[in-house]
Image (cartoon, grey):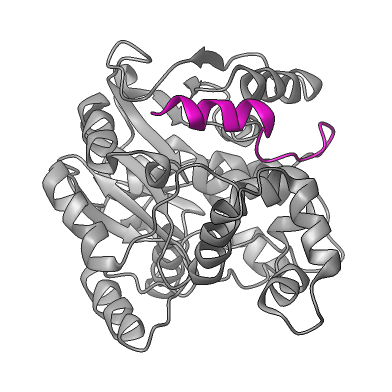
Amino acid sequence: MPESVRRHYELYPYPDYPLLASVRRCDTYANNLDALWARFNGELPPDRLRRILIAGCGSFAPYPFALANPDSAITALDLSQKSLRRARLHCLLHGITHPEFVAGDLLDPLAAPGPFGFIDCYGVLHHLEDPLAGLTALEKRLGEGGILRVMVYSTYTRFEEDSIRRALRLLKVRSPEQVRQMVARARKGSRLREFFEQSQEVSSRSGLADALLHPLATSFKIDRFLGLVGESGLKPLIFAHRGALSDPGAEAARIRELEARRESPGNFVLYLGKDAKGGCGEGGSFRLNPCLAGELSRPHLTPLLIPGRLGEANPPIPRGERSFLRRFKKPVAATALLSEDLTRAKQYADKLFLLRCRS
């Protein structure tokens, strides 16, 4: 990764959430390794692959991943020492000590060597000079059955940011303060003013720098992105951006139709697999995602709300559904469920609220 990118994140660690900002463990359910492995392999991960790599962890991601996986080894890799220090401090302030923090380049095979059961690379590949080299480096770190989540910029989602970013580079604008001065002078209704009025990302100094002052940012159309995936040898498992269809082929076709109208569903979020076995389609047993156990045991006067993480919103969970989910604190065989309860359990397994395993 270029030195200019490292310097950027030394100046502007991202994101800049308050150090005392916390998340509920139930909100991290889609980061749980057991749940992901069961969804895409139909079983629990082998002990040697109970390892998670956050490739380009930034200043916050190790905290929710550690919260979701207290018994898994977690390696947080980043170019920026400043980002790593802040990420480590955030964890310590919340009583979390087990992640390992590593300063290094994901392109370096000696930095955080595998095998890993799950790798998260969210918002990183588009900052590489050669995204395919980055994707290939991550594929080599995955164990058999391993899962990789990536997020990359979408061309039509980033259209305004990319246009403004190019203009700022031509004008040699290099600091958030200079950008804010330009916005203050911009006429009402101008593209720059409207972008700032509509974008939440630029409300913070580091967010503004990441969106508009980054030295290297590439956006993708869907076919170029899937071309990289194909060359890496990894297989698409499911798209997870908002509104995504559950079948990756159907979602890719939907995105092509949107792009023909110069539209986009948002930046692309995709889970990839390395020889994943596929989920448990019949039989097996269901068990509760461990991230949900604590919250389901607490009294709630209103339905429990847990944000969706796989492309669609989760409906509120009323008392009756919470009681149903609590039945799975210990594994329950599919054959022991009534037909209507089996249907409900399958739906919750699709959402990662339940784990369905063959044995």
Residues in magenta, as a range? 1-21
Query: In the shown orientation, is residue 69 left or right of residue 346?
Result: right
- Name the quadrant of the C terminus: top left
Residue 266 visible to the viewer: yes
Residue 297 visible to the viewer: no
Q: Quadrant of residue 92?
A: top right
Q: Position of residue 51 (x, y in %)?
A: 40, 22
Query: In the shown orientation, is residue 212 left or right of residue 222?
Result: right
Q: Position of residue 101 (x, y in %)?
A: 55, 15
- Name the quadrant of the N terminus: top left
Classify 293 as above or below 134.
Answer: below
Residue at the (62%, 73%) spot, across then down: 315
Classify 31 as above or below 260.
Answer: above
Residue at the bottom extreme, as displayed = 261
Residue at the top extreme, as displayed = 110
Classify 154 as above or below 216.
Answer: below
Closer to the camera in the image, 225 or 173? 173
Residue at the (78%, 25%) spot, across then down: 94
Residue at the (52%, 67%) spot, across then down: 163
Q: Position of residue 223 (x, y in %)?
A: 21, 66
Q: Position of residue 61 (x, y in %)?
A: 60, 35
Residue 7 on the magenta span: yes
Residue at the (36%, 13%) spot, across then down: 111
Q: Quadrant of residue 135?
A: top left
Residue at the front extreme, as displayed = 171
